[in-house]
Amino acid sequence: MWTMLKLAACAAALTASVMTASVQAVSVPASPVQGSAPTSSLQASPTSSLQTGNEAVGGVQLGERAVRADAPQRVSQAAVPATIAFTNNAHLWILDASRADAVPRQVTAQGKAEIAGWSADGQWLLYLQYDRADDYSSPAYLWAVKADGTGAFRVDERPILDQPKWSPVSRTFAYRVNAAGTGEQRKPVLVVAEMAGEKAVVVGSRTTELADFAWMPDGRRLLVSVPAASGRPMTLQLTDLAGNRLAAYPLAEPPNVEEGIYPWAADGLTVAPDGKRVAYYVRVSSASLSADGVAIQMFDLTQPARKPVDIGSGLAYPEWLAWSPDSSLLAFIDGSDRMATHNKRVTLADANGRVIPAGQPDKVDALPTWTAAAPYALYFTRGVAKEYQYEPQKPMVPGQRIWRRSAAGSQQAVTQGTDKTADTFPAPSPDGNALLFVRLDAAEHGSLYLKTGSESEVELLRHVTGDIGYYGNYLPPWIRVFWKEQKPH
């Protein structure tokens, strides 16, 4: 999956334009295994924290892959009320774990796949497909597949620019592509589409200048980030799905672009569930400098006259920002330096921006994830901090476990294992009584485990594989879980 951050083009390459509404249907091929389209990393702008290729990093060379793993194998017959998308040997698979007799179903067979996420009702999965396993030079295309692994189809014939995003309340989603043309004429197009039957219908598209976007909780509006330019500050805009501007929120003064390096855009927009606040990273106009850490800010959309609040600094990964379901707390990973194996601490900020440190000395944290039901608990990964070193036969942070912070603030490890393994990708059930996670036994190989309450951990699925990501961040995730019910039975 990810092995090197694709921080490519300059912010100046984005230009503003006008909205063009359109409606069109995309037909659905019905083959059970998609063999024509490929999988795995995006063509990133300076605002994208998503893309990674396989450039030389810590001993991992361009195009180098781990030894091919065996096909995925279901180990436990425990019925878990969840649908699980995962990767194996760069291909996408889906398991309906609610059926004890179900086995993993392969969706892609060529190139490389990268999982984007489940629709709000869990009926559709979006993923990126690359024509070649070398995702660093291959463009990504947006595909959709039903939860049972059938009906896969390409959503758009144009390469996608960054991760698509589902509406939080429906089967509507938004994504960005480049319009036809060359050079400066290739303006980004923001597309809004919805699943209708077994196809995607475009309900609106517009050429636009933006660095990032996020859905508002009502699913009827978007919050978009407009980058700074000469005489123009970096700005957030609230729009409807047709692109009509409803409000604008300048976040800073216009920059002095002649200085060369300046705050460029809000990225990784993460809107609180109540829609009142947004957290984001402040990308600067240098992709290289942004890769080592940027300011993290919180902005109150209900008090636009107030300045954003600085709450920390960190690597610009949207997966490292997470609001509690009641919008009272933001969990984020604080700490600079592009290496993900040290100097990264789980931290909280309340709705007023008051920072609550929650890290531990000499530990490294990642992937904060809240339970959906009260009392809200925070799950995250934690291990002993170490210098970045890639060794294929070892996890990047040996001995890393899944930790839980209770609503009262107590913290404890909830998974157990040896220093030869590491646990990652925590996926708690909505009530927090069950936990799915990946146990790594090598840098790019592991198994999916289930833990329920105080019961022992059960290996559910063997041979889950992916990349270590950009300097060991293990992004994008190797698994995406949609919980159908509160807990396993």
Image (spheres, rainbow, N blue to C red):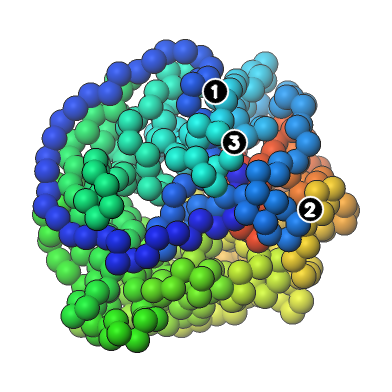
- Identify the residue position indicated by label 2 in the image: 395
Please tell me the numbered disc located at residue 301.
Answer: none
Q: Which of 324/145 is in front?
A: 145
Residue pictured at 71% horizontal, 76% vertical:
360
Q: Which of 284/174 is in front?
A: 284
SS for tag 1?
A: loop
The type of residue carrying mark 3 is Ala
Quarter of the rendering containing residue 97 = top right
- Residue at the extreme front of the image, as rendered: 182
* Disc 3 to disc 2, C-alpha distance: 22 Å
Please tell me the numbered disc located at residue 133.
Answer: 3
Q: Which of 478/311 is in front?
A: 478
Left or right: 407, with 175 as reference point? right
- Identify the residue position indicated by label 1 in the image: 107
- Dividing the image into 4 quarters, which one contains the C terminus? top right
Task: Give how far across and how far down residue 478 sits, in percent.
Answer: 61, 42
Task: Give how far across and how far down residue 428 sits, in percent.
Answer: 60, 47
Task: Give how far across and how far down residue 170 sits, in percent.
Answer: 31, 38
The type of residue carrying mark 1 is Val
